[in-house]
Amino acid sequence: MSKNTTAATKSTNIQWHDGKVTAEKRIQLMGQKGATLWFTGLSGSGKSTIAVEVELALLEKDKVAYRLDGDNIRHGLNRNLGFSPEDRTENIRRIGEVTKLFADAGVISLCSFISPYKADRDEVRSIHLEHGIPFIEVYVDCPLAEAEKRDPKGFYKKARSGEIKGFTGIDAPYEAPNDMEIHLRTDQLSLTEECGKIINFLSENSYI
Amino acid sequence: MSKNTTAATKSTNIQWHDGKVTAEKRIQLMGQKGATLWFTGLSGSGKSTIAVEVELALLEKDKVAYRLDGDNIRHGLNRNLGFSPEDRTENIRRIGEVTKLFADAGVISLCSFISPYKADRDEVRSIHLEHGIPFIEVYVDCPLAEAEKRDPKGFYKKARSGEIKGFTGIDAPYEAPNDMEIHLRTDQLSLTEECGKIINFLSENSYI
């Protein structure tokens, strides 16, 4: 800590801070700006695969990044929520609040959620914008036929057979974004190119 | 990203990762280990003041730290919770889940909550231990008379006059910890010494 600050504080020991580390100071000390990258796309589109690559690439550049997804959110913070409209809204609200905290901490969070409804994505975006936190929507645009062919978790097969109901792309809609910051055409780009496109965006916009 | 990994992934573009960045890899890349510092103590004991100093000291050492407190939790993620027993439990559960995420991200989080009940603190501790996440309880031990004299937010005055009910230390108990990792006697230590004691603990235990 700086000598001046310490001296000033020590002299009284009862000086009350609301927060000595301003957003600008944090950016300067961390060499990066907190932001939320929101990956949306069909199940099997490659959201998590891309997020994993970007996370590793950022950490190897000495940047701080962290992935949030169904595994660590739905099974943790949001494990007491179901899929009713109220619970869906609360699910999105809590995720938005957590990504706000990470961005405020200077971390770049990589959120992979199918998030098929535009209204839900816009809600998370507006939670961010209200607080001046950058929200970067990444549309992982993979043709349904390709995602279904991959079917990494066997969900499409179960959805086709009726074992799973309301599955996005089969018997529930996916509302494709039209105002995303980054559009990844997975039928045209390799994983390395997809990752590069995101890193370039972050760099060109001074997040890293 | 490493060449080998990229090549292996690019060759198929449908390799599915549960998470390429292991905990060990993250520690190595970030040069620190995620952990939760939990500051407990009376209102006015100096919890937030100390946490602010420690946060700044860590950031200036190129470590990643972030404070969580009533301001950014109660007014954000937990703003739909009151103070009923059920809501108090859910409040603690959600805070525990968020600090788990931060620790998993490699961040050292500094949580300042009066947290007057041993059962609540033990609950957060057990949420951490279940997932192998370090939990470091810091008892900010300030005599009630001193905290009341400081009364930075005017709460004690209101509690004495009856305007606030159930205020910790006045008409609600504070259950002092007896198994904390760090004990700060604020009547014996300066702010600089308190901060130094915490930084030393983190260093000696290889968190930083």
Image (tube, coloured by chain):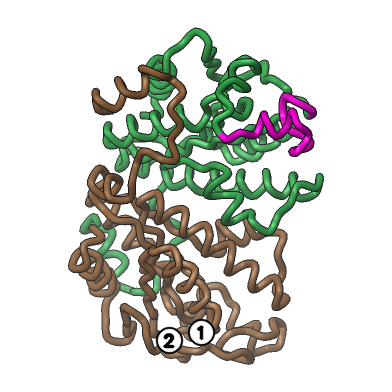
Chain colours: A brown, B green
Using the rendered view, name the quadrant where residue B12 is placed. Answer: bottom left
Residue B58 lies left or right of residue B129; in this view the side is: left
The numbered mark 2 sits on a residue in which chain?
Answer: A
* Label of residue A177 in the image: 2
Q: Marks 2 and 1: CB-CB under 8 Å?
A: yes
Residue B164 highlighted magenta (yes or no): yes
Q: Can residue B178 be seen at all in this image of the molecule?
A: yes
Q: How crowded is mark 1: few (under 14 residues within 10 Å), some or many (20 or more)?
A: few
Cα separation between marks 2 and 1: 7 Å
Element carrying mark 1: helix
Q: Where's residue B114, x and y in %? A: 63, 32
Residue at 56% x, 31% y is: B38
Observer-nearest of A180 and A79: A180
Q: Can you say whether A197 is above or below B112 in the image? A: below
Amino acid bearing label 1: Lys
Residue B61 lies left or right of residue B136; in this view the side is: left
Q: Where's residue B173, x and y in %? A: 77, 25
Q: Can you say whether A42 is above or below A131 in the image? A: below
Residue A89 highlighted magenta (yes or no): no
Residue at 37% x, 53% y is: A107
Q: Can you say whether B107 is above or below A24 in the image? A: above
* Label of residue A118 in the image: 1
Residue at 53% x, 60% y is: A97
Amino acid bearing label 2: Pro
Range of residues picked out in magenta: B153-171
Total number of numbered labels? Answer: 2
Using the rendered view, name the quadrant where residue B170 is placed. Answer: top right
Main SS of residues in magenta: loop
